[in-house]
Image (tube, grey):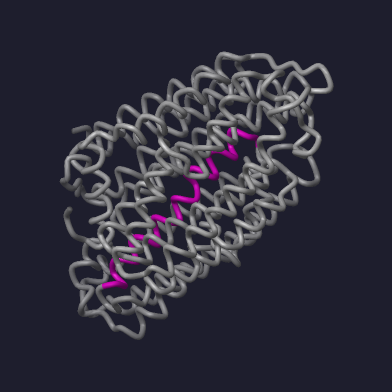
Amino acid sequence: MIPMTVLVAAMVAACLLCIAVRRSPAVKIVTPACILVLLVLAVGACMPAIEGGVVDDGVFYMDGLSAVFMLLVAFVGLMASIYSGAYITADLEEGEITHREHSHYYPLLIVFVSVMMLTFSVRSMAVVWLGVGATTLVSTFLVGFYSREESTEAAWKYIILCSVGITIALFGLTLTYAAAVGVVDSGEALDWPVLMAHAAELDPVMMKMAMVLVIVGFGTKVGFVPMHTWLPDAHSRAPSPVSGLLSAVLLNCAMYGILRMYGVSEIVNPGFASTLMLAFGFLSLGTAAFFIVSARDMKRMLAYSSIENMGLIAIGIGIGTPAALFAAMVQLVAHSITKPILFFSAGDIIQAYGTRTMSEIRGVSKALPFTGAMMAAGTLAIVGCPPFLVFAGELGLLMGALGSGMAWAAALMAVLLAIVFAGFVRNVFPMLTGEPGKDVELGHRASRCLPVAILFAATLLLGLFMPDAVADWLRDAAGCILGVSS
């Protein structure tokens, strides 16, 4: 086991190193190398949690749930940093960004990844809240990275709406603290393990109000409808490597805060938080499905797909049975490793064609064979076609709904997922077929292809042959939501 202090020290050192070499061409190699080191150290730090134990060391606390979220951030962050080497260099060569902006990108990227990883390693919900807020501040600069009016507007919209949401979540945590003081020591009143141990003694009325505020507050950052309006703008205007990170792992940070408080609420007021999660889940899934069908901008369509997947995860949490919670964890992992395939492929297409409007893009499979193949595979994966991992997650959610006697939920999910499938097929596959209509060139192929190929292999192989150890880990993570071991 690697002590958490070593991992934190490595994060600080990695950030300082990237800042020191930010003006050197070597920064696009140094940044992935640093994140790879953080990934290796994170695996070592999380190993007791992966094996079903707990890391409890002062301010640091990690169980199976924490380990899933942390390692997803490190893995997807590594893929995004590799892909950035080609993508950001192309932007620099085409005059989309200046050398000064280029020197800011990689330090911001590694700080962003480090802050997200730290958010999942602490025991206090107050520190989790600080982590979610810090991710908002850092990612705002990445959302508004391009010096364009639309990007600046998206960044302002993002930080204002998410800051309001995080403030609402703070009120919820304040009510939780008030309910816990007198039951536990004030210094531990927001420590998640302590809250779980004494949840039955907390005031039910105050905890109902707290949970509403927590779900609405953190749900704003998750992208739950109707608090989602920042998300399509932010994800579509950010650089494509950043869009992949925002969708795949940033939304998970706020979802993590909800999951921790959900377990406490279900002990105090059984079924209350579940009902709220079901309501937000179906509202998000339904709204996203219809926006996906009518989308014209490629990255906005992918952004609405993120809202759809967060809705599916919320539905699994709302169903609340062990089978549904396990399926929700599978869906969360599947979305995190599948969605970057689409955002990275979209980045290739946008840079090659010079437009994000899907009706103006044709012949991708001929002009960019690898990108076209990965866009097609990623589309089939994200809409839940077998044998990809999203299929396993969605099938598990449907079976979980049926197993809990919620046939109506299974039927409604099936209908809305069919609409999502139709929307993606309608929008994506015409882009891949036909003739390009113009000369299309795209350089720096190696660093573009490698991360997409790794992500594709991950979602395919986990869908086909999920190892028993990984399945047990995800079951343990699902059990941790309710404070029980699998």
Left or right: where does residue 20 sit relative to residue 73?
right
Q: What main secondary structure does the magenta stretch of the protein show?
A: helix
Whole-percent x and y of residue 407? 39, 68
Whole-percent x and y of residue 126? 38, 61
Image position of 201 with respect to 36: above or below: below
Left or right: where does residue 475 sit relative to residue 434?
left
Q: Nearer the viewer, residue 121 or 251?
A: 251
What is the number of callouts on the image? 0
Q: Nearer the viewer, residue 201 or 482?
A: 482
Q: Residue at x 32, y 59 (%)?
A: 400
| Residue range of the region highlighted in magenta in the rendering | 239-266
In terms of image quadrants, where is residue 361?
top right
Q: Which residue of the protein is positioned furthest toward the bottom in this rendering? A: 205
Residue 98 visible somewhere in the drawing: no
- Rendered-image quadrant of the N terminus: top left
Left or right: where does residue 75 sit relative to residue 309?
left
Residue 474 visible somewhere in the drawing: yes
The answer to whether residue 237 is magenta is no
In terms of image quadrants, where is residue 441?
top right
The answer to whether residue 250 is magenta is yes
Q: Which residue is drawn at 36% across and 69% down?
A: 406
Q: Which of 200 and 383 is in front in this view?
A: 383
Whole-percent x and y of residue 11? 39, 33
Q: Residue at x 21, y 65 (%)?
A: 194
Q: Which of 254 and 414 is in front in this view?
A: 414
Whole-percent x and y of residue 285? 54, 60
